Each structure stands twice: as C-alpha cells, then as structure tokens.
Image (spheres, rainbow, N blue to C red):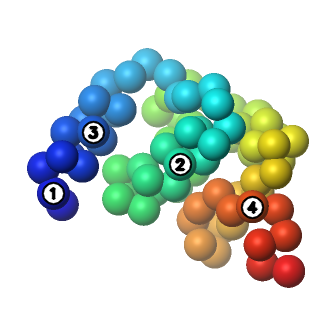
C-alpha cells in the first residue's frame, strides 16, 4: 500500500468518530473494508462505537445500501 494511503488510514483510524456526511461516510466505510482495516461492517461499527443498523438506516435514507456479498456500501438499485 502506498505510504500516503497508509498515513491517511492511520489518521482516520485514530479519529474517535465516523464522518457525518453521507458521501464521505460511504467512501470511508468502503475504503476501510476494501483495505482490510476491518473484516466486516459490524467490526468497523464496533470500533467506532456505532450501531450497525443505525449506520445502515442512515445511509439507506441517503440512497445507499450495504452489500454483504461485496462488503461495501452501494447506491440503492445498483445491482438491479
């Protein structure tokens, strides 16, 4: 992994909360899962002391759904 990505991830992991903006939240979740910083959405939410269903519900309201198969947040209807 390039050093600039590692530095970003390390800074993000040291944060005490997830972003509130839906687009940034989706991007952050997908990056952390893709780069295997966390092995599941549940473990990521646990680390940041957030409820998984709360995160899924908030993002669903903003047009995103979690794909268990892909282990990423995707736009609603992406797979349709």
Name the residue furthest top: 16
| Residue on which disc 2 sits | 27
Which residue: 82% across, 51% down?
Answer: 63
> Are dots 3 and 2 in contact, CB under 8 Å?
no
| Residue on which disc 4 sits | 75
Q: How far apart are marks 3 and 2 (CA)?
A: 13 Å
Which element carries disc 2, helix, strand or loop?
Answer: helix
> Are dots 1 and 2 in contact, CB under 8 Å?
no
| Residue on which disc 1 sits | 2
Image location of residue 5, percent across then percent down = 24, 49
Which residue: 85% across, 80% down?
Answer: 80
Few, some or many residues within 10 Å of mark 1 (<14, 14–19, 20+)? few
Q: Distance between the residues labelled 1 and 2?
A: 18 Å
Image location of residue 71, percent across then percent down = 57, 65
Say if residue 53 shows up in the picture. no
Q: How far apart are marks 4 and 3 (CA)?
A: 24 Å
Few, some or many residues within 10 Å of mark 2 (<14, 14–19, 20+)? some
**Nearer-N-terminus badge (4/1):** 1
Which element carries disc 1, helix, strand or loop?
Answer: loop
Which element carries disc 4, helix, strand or loop?
Answer: strand
Name the residue furthest left: 3
**Nearer-N-terminus badge (2/4):** 2
**Nearer-N-terminus badge (3/2):** 3
Q: Is residue 41 left or right of residue 75?
A: left
Few, some or many residues within 10 Å of mark 4 (<14, 14–19, 20+)? some
Image location of residue 45, percent across then percent down = 57, 37
| Residue on which disc 3 sits | 8
């Amino acid at each position: 992994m390039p050093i600039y990505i590692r530095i970003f991830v390390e800074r993000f992991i040291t944060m005490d909360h997830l972003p509130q903006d839906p687009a940034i939240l989706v991007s952050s979740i997908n990056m952390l899962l893709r780069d295997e910083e966390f092995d599941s959405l549940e473990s990521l939410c646990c680390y940041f002391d957030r409820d998984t269903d709360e995160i899924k519900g908030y993002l669903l309201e903003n047009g995103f759904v979690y794909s268990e198969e892909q282990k990423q947040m995707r736009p609603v209807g992406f797979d349709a």
